[in-house]
Amino acid sequence: MEFVILAVVIALVAIGAITGLVVTSRRKKRLPPPPPSAPTITAPPAEPHVGEEAGPPTAEERRTIEEVGLPGAGATVAEAPAPAPVPEAPPVEVPAPTAGRLVRLRARLSRSQNSLGKGLLTLLSREHLDEDTWEEIEDTLLTADVGVAPTQELVERLRERVKVLGTRTPEELRTLLREELLTLIGTEADRSVKTDGGLETPAVVMVVGVNGTGKTTTTGKLARVLVADGRSVVLGAADTFRAAAADQLQTWGERVGARTVRGPESGDPASVAFDAVKEGIAEGADVVLIDTAGRLHTKAGLMDELGKVKRVVEKHGPLDEVLLVLDATTGQNGLVQARVFSEVVDITGIVLTKLDGTAKGGIVVAVQRELGVPVKLVGLGEGADDLAPFEPEAFVDALIGD
């Protein structure tokens, strides 16, 4: 019996020792420290400490909802971005008067045209003017795009006058050649652009030509010519098939204070032309310039379009001027374009652009003979004021040089 009691006591002591060992091991067990190179991460315990492990409560500052302030008038708020500045309208320019402009541009013209005049003077200065020399003179004129018929007429007159003249000094030859070239070009034609409208309607000028000849630019430069001569202008952007045409024309107009009337892209050109004339009447403008499309892929389509524009414009009053813009560098090809447009509308005047970029000044003679209308304006560069009224005397003086 005593043995049994002793065994039970020993068992209870063993159980108590084991239990105490387990509890002690639980209390002493800790995670190994992190390696020196690893950063120490402090994280809150996964669960609150309870029992013997619970620490003293931490006092935290607490505020009621009334004590929490809301952003007020003094709070800093991100400011909205300032609106983009509105671009200022370009200052209105005042072009110089056009009187004598071609004379001022003579040096630029003579640089490209001198070869024609000098070549003719050199040939005419030969001691013996045989048939070979006269053929060279003909070739020089034909190469300058004077045209076959005008060349033959000029050569025949030169033959007669040289024969009568006998001895030929350089000054006599220059005078002779100047007179004959002026006769060929013509000095009697009215080369002014008609800008006198009716009592209640402005003058209406329609500008036609193939795209690429500088038609829209010429229209803008013509506005400067008219403003320089004291005229008020309204522009009509009736070339609605080129998106850039209306923008380009409007830019030209803004530079001289001229209003530009435009319509939707690919809209009806006749409608734009009608509105432009209507606006010109309302403003009391002196001149309305209408820039038209220059598509030549079908002559029938061109004829219908320009014919409609002409008819619609004439509901307000007569069409005073139809100017055909030609690129002087195209030479005889420009005459083909001139024929097509002359069949569509009644051309009243010619504008030759890029005349400073070609030595073929004879195109002035050829195109006048082809259409029976005078050259009224010539373009002599890229500058805004490089469009000048055509003056035969200044042109011939540039051809033959000093």
Image (cartoon, grey):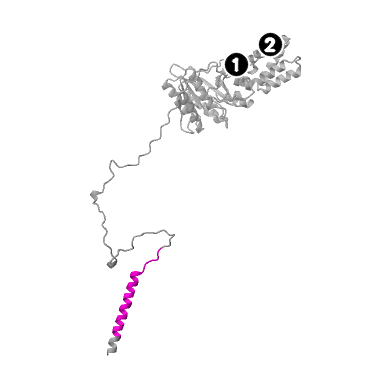
Q: Residue at x 41, y 58 (%)?
A: 39
Residue 356 coordinates in the image, percent (x, y): 60, 23
Q: Is residue 145 left or right of residue 225?
A: right
In the image, residue 51 above or below residue 103: below
| Distance from Cα at disc 2 to Cα at disc 1 | 19 Å
In the image, residue 219 above or below residue 40: above
Res 337 seen here: yes
Label whose residue precedes the other's in the sequence (2 or 1) = 2
Res 348 seen here: no
Q: Overall secondary structure of the magenta stretch?
A: helix
Q: Secondary structure at mark 2?
A: helix
In front: 396, or 44? Answer: 44
Magenta extent = 7-33
| Res 169 quadrant in image | top right
Residue 69 coordinates in the image, percent (x, y): 26, 47
Mark sitting on residue 258: none
Residue 243 coordinates in the image, percent (x, y): 50, 33
Q: Residue at x 53, y 26 (%)?
A: 217
**Total number of numbered labels?**
2
Q: Are marks 2 and 1 in contact (CB under 8 Å)?
A: no
Mark sitting on residue 394: 1
In front: 53, or 309? Answer: 53
| Res 352 quadrant in image | top right
Q: Secondary structure at mark 1?
A: helix
Within-10-Å neighbours for mark 2: few <14, some 14–19, many 20+: few
Within-10-Å neighbours for mark 1: few <14, some 14–19, many 20+: some
Residue indicated by mark 2? 172
Q: Residue at x 68, y 23 (%)?
A: 143
